[in-house]
Amino acid sequence: MNAVLKPAEAQFEAMTPSWLPAVARVEQSAYEHPWTQTNFSDSIHAGYRAQLLTAGSPPDAALIGYFIAMKGAGEVHLLNITVAPAHQGQGWAPLMLDGLAVWARSQDAQWLWLEVRVGNTRAKAVYERYGFRHVGTRRNYYPAGPAGLGGATKREDALVMSLPL
């Protein structure tokens, strides 16, 4: 059984290459179609905002979650936000969105953008409670299962959501 952590026990820190194996393990445990460790490494090297939410002190710090965001002209695009399954349902996602919004405002962003799977009702509810609104749909955006007959991979639509800052 995992202890419930309090926000005062958590801190943001930069995602560094030394964290990538732990990040990849969380990603694989959280998603059917996870990012690879290389996706995270590429994001760091591209200069994207890559933040961890951790609790405790190194080397025993616990990974609560992380996000990756890309700055654009007057906007920030959230590429990945994940709360480790052991810490889900404890209010960490809104805290990470707060951290993202503070950083985005410091970059003079006017908008936050994201895509979310149509079927991910839990994440959609978090984003809607935070103030994001559905503004469009990307058809067949996400992989949604193994290849079927003829080798075609099943796909799932994404909702495009935005938040004015």
Image (cartoon, rainbow, N blue to C red):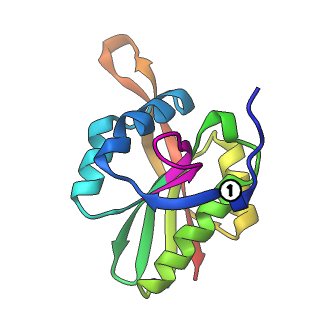
On whether residue 35 falls in the magenta region, the answer is no
Give the answer, above or below, for where 36 lies relative to 76.
above
Q: Main secondary structure of the magenta part?
A: strand
Query: Which amino acid does the dot numbered 1 rest on?
Result: Glu
The answer to which quarter of the image holds residue 162 is bottom right
Q: Position of residue 9 (x, y in %)?
A: 68, 56
The vertical placement of 74 against 140, above or below, is: below
Residue 75 left/right relative to 73: right
Looking at the image, residue 26 sits to the left or right of residue 146; the answer is right
Quadrant in which the N terminus appears: top right
Image position of 127 (left or right of 159): right
| Residue under the image location 54 percent in, 43 percent down | 63
> What residue is shown at x 58% (from left), y 83% (from top)?
165
Residue at image coords 66%, 48%? 123
Q: Residue furthest bottom?
A: 108
Q: How many marks?
A: 1
Numbered disc 1: secondary structure = helix
- Work out whether residue 55 or residue 92 is closer to the camera in this orientation and state it: 55
Q: Which residues are magenta?
A: 51-66
Residue 161 percent location from the top left of the image: 57, 63
User: Most extreme residue toward the top, as rendered?
Assistant: 149
Where in the figure is residue 66, as x and y percent of width and height? 50, 51
Relative to the observer, which residue lies in front, 140 or 122? 122
**Can residue 118 be seen here?**
yes
User: Would you name the residue on which mark 1 appears?
Assistant: 9
User: Percent position (x, y) of residue 52?
Assistant: 48, 54
**Which class describes the residues within 10 Å of circle 1: few (<14), some (14-19), or many (20+)?**
few
Picture quadrant where residue 4 is located: top right
Query: Is residue 61 inside the magenta stretch?
Result: yes
Q: Which residue corresponds to the image point at 34% horizontal and 35% vertical from the top-left? A: 36
